[in-house]
Amino acid sequence: MSAKVNSIGLKGLEGYRVQVEVEVMEGVESVIIVGLPDASVKESRERVSAALHNMGHSIVDKKIVVNLSPAEQKKNGPLFDLAIALGVLIGGEFVSEKPPKDAAFIGALSLDGSIVPVQGMLPCVLAAKQLGMKKLYLPFEPYFPQIAIEDLELVYVSSVHEVLEHLSGKPVLPFHSVEKVSESKAIVLDRDFKQIIGHECAKRALEIAAAGGHHVMMEGPPGCGKSMLAETFPTILPQLSKDAQLEKVSLYQLADAPLDSLTLPPFRHPHHSASAVSIIGGGSNPKPGEVSLAHCGVQFLDELAEFSKKTLDMLRQPLQNGKVTISRAHSTVTYPSTFIFLAAMNPCPCGYLGSSKQYCTCTENKIRAYQNRVSGPILDRMDIVLTLKPVNLKEMNFSSTESSLDIRKRIVAARQRQYERYGAEITNGEVLLERLLEVSPLTEKQKQLMHDICMEHGLSNRVHVKVTRIARTIADLNNEEKISDQAMIEAFELRGIKVKGYQLGEYHG
């Protein structure tokens, strides 16, 4: 007898329907799985056989053929164990229960018949909704976020026996998530902007970057505060929305990476010795890399010039498009990677070029070679360029610093204006240029200012666009309906360009 059971397969974050077709026949005892299974899927034969034996169902003298359809799509992972076991039970007429056509089953089996969690369950849940499934059977994961998806019933089960009972009409005892505990821990912050003395211009620049989703390059001698500012930067970012939380958990599950917090934006800080695969993602079964784990958060590369040129050039696609495509011989997957990029580097190998406190020992050729490690296209993709100097603590006022909470309130308000303007959770840093200019057109005077400065300094069209985006964010922070002239001037200054001829609201080119 044959049986058909629905399951969910994954290709990156994208899910697709897998129909598990099982044919149970008389013959030499064997279990054959076809449909381009990888090694972990082929091992389902032993897990399913042992689980059915412990449940009291013998498959001696049975030839079982399992087809995972679509046959042309490579299958990987133990996601299909539960569906295969259920198909064997139905196809071998061991049980009379039959699953509904709009139900899907995911989960790995233990040898005693219990169902255990696997990687990628949350992407499977989201895919089941998109595929029109009405019910999804899956194992319970204590740290699985509590989600309510419209028109999709999630049935958490711990064994094949519970699945059969639920299919026969018996209720399944509910499980309780520990999400609330993890959320309360996530709010505790060990850093705050009020702990940073001085660097008022840098704090202002980081506030603008957080409000509009802009990339920042920081350059300065060792000990001037670059790493401290970057590591404190996440404390002024708004908490993740529900959709962003689901995307974050999905990516971390696929990468098998520990999840530190559910509501806080991720902060990734890879060492400069990290390989290109670990940064971008990859492998025979492509997994998310650091740029995808930083999705909806921050990617910080300290000592940028120490990273390999190959690795830095591979950052072009995620910085430009907000996604990364990984192509391998067996599959091509695309992961989201929309993040705020923070980079820090020294001005020269010794770090003291231009310092008034230390003498630079680097030759001109060494300085040029060091700075050329970061290619022009990467620097061109940076929105804000900061040059930091050491802070003289004797001249600082220790009581005038703002807390991260105060700064975050302004950022949340600025982002809300952007969401309302664009009709979606899109920031000025990622919105399409056509849409940006449609809702915030530049005046003729501002266009002339932009043209003259770009021609004078040899700026690319990309920089032209980025200055406009930053000016729009500054206007949002100032609660201005239109881009003001002063916002344009400040945007150019954040690129390290002083505007000449601007006086009393008029520009004289």
Image (cartoon, rainbow, N blue to C red):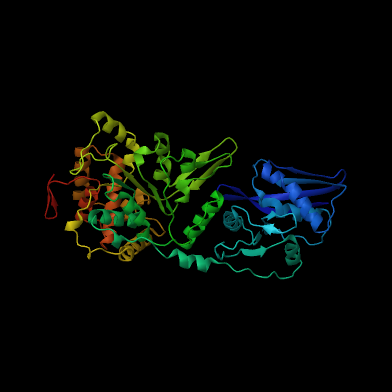
| Total marks in image | 0
* Residue 427 locus on image (x, y percent): 37, 55
- The foreground one among 234 and 472 is 234
- Residue at 36%, 45% (x, y): give it: 302
Q: Is residue 46 left or right of residue 227?
A: right
Picture layout, residue 434 above or below residue 394: above
- The foreground one among 217 and 436 is 217
Q: Is residue 505 visible?
A: yes
Picture layout, residue 360 above or below residue 449: above
Q: Is residue 256 left or right of residue 389?
A: right
* Residue 415 locus on image (x, y percent): 35, 60
Q: Is residue 6 left or right of residue 306?
A: right
Which image quadrant is residue 317 in? top left
* Residue 269 locus on image (x, y percent): 41, 49
- The foreground one among 79 and 194 is 194
The C terminus: image quadrant:
top left
- Residue at 82%, 61% (x, y): give it: 96
Q: Is residue 90 visible?
A: no
- Residue at 25%, 61% (x, y): give it: 478
- Residue at 75%, 56% (x, y): give it: 86
* Residue 115 locus on image (x, y percent): 69, 58
Picture layout, residue 411 above or below residue 326: below
Picture layout, residue 17 above or below residue 148: above
Q: Is residue 175 left or right of residue 476?
A: right
